[in-house]
Amino acid sequence: MRIVLQKVSEGSVDVVDETSGEVDTTFEPQHIGIGYVLLVGVEDTDGAKQIDWLAHKIANLRVFEDENGKMNRSIHDVDGSVLSISQFTLYADVRKGNRPSFVKAGAPDHAEQVWHAFNDALRAQGLDVKEGRFGAHMRVSLTNDGPVTIIFDTDELGI
Amino acid sequence: MRIVLQKVSEGSVDVVDETSGEVDTTFEPQHIGIGYVLLVGVEDTDGAKQIDWLAHKIANLRVFEDENGKMNRSIHDVDGSVLSISQFTLYADVRKGNRPSFVKAGAPDHAEQVWHAFNDALRAQGLDVKEGRFGAHMRVSLTNDGPVTIIFDTDELGI
């Protein structure tokens, strides 16, 4: 799995109806205050091991500032929330040409299943998790406060 | 170098005064419409080769949608701009413990120089480039429209 974590003071998502170009009213826009916006990419080989490692790591990561301005607090400590967004483009291969290839991204059915299981694993860590809509045209708005952006790649991490 | 590219409908940055916690009025908030917000991390080994490869690749990348909704247009085609933000946390090592180590991030002087040279290389590709302030506490706001997020890592790419 690949995750781009952004530490935010707020984040929100809505869905765009591809035909009308208007807001898709069948999706309730989601909003969080302080916390993380997670852009989540899934490969075909991903499963419980990657899900559990990432959920535990992110729930316990200490990158929020304490009273001395040091990165010392976790998302629990600041009573933060998570906005989780599926993002297959994290597996873009940009080596050749100007149009990235996305063949490394997982098959949609599998990717959706893993993404949902990951969100549940975050909830099992005691976190409030809001979700976008898998595979939809979404607009993800956020304020990255710091900024703090961290890349997780379970292949690179050997997980 | 590591870059997290987010395709945006708008992006902006302001700076927070660390002592007062208020907006730092010595920094003019920067704003772009359609284009890319680039979070840019630099290592000690980075230089002209990485800068030039990335500037050319990003200037010519075709990830904006055409009239058929296909990723076919470049930032030039949509008259887009770049908001470039230095982001050392992209070199976070999250393997051990809950507080990431940032030892892989480049020394600040070198990183600042490379970041500025990269922004100039993007300008040399004909792009309008707005900048945050290196090393400051910044708030980066954006709307990732798609969403489309792409990770570039020149080590991984062998550049």
Image (tube, coloured by chain):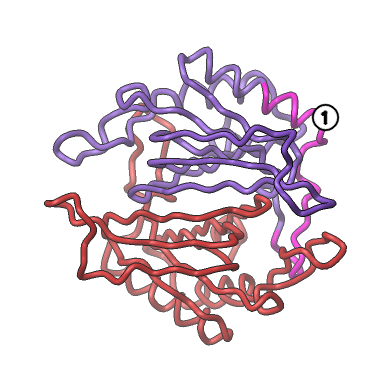
Chain colours: A purple, B red
Quick one: A55 or B6, which is closer to the camera? B6
Q: Is residue A32 magenta?
A: no
Which quadrant of the view contains residue A105?
Answer: top right
The answer to which of A102 and A38 lies nearer the viewer is A38
**Is most of the magenta stretch helix, strand or loop?**
loop
Q: Type of residue at label 1? A: Asp
Q: Nearer the viewer, residue B21 or A118?
A: B21
Q: Image height check: is B121 above or below A78?
A: below
Q: State whether residue A15 is above or below residue B140.
A: above
x, y (%) of residue B87? Answer: 39, 56
Mark 1 is surrounded, within 10 Å at the Cα level, by few (under 14), some (14 to 19) or many (20 or more) other residues, namely: few
Circle 1 is placed at which residue position? Answer: A109
Q: Residue at x 76, y 40 (%)?
A: A135
Which residue range is magenta in the image? A94-116
Q: Residue at x 63, y 48 (%)?
A: A139
Q: Residue at x 66, y 38 (%)?
A: A86
Judged left or right of residue A69, residue A39 is right
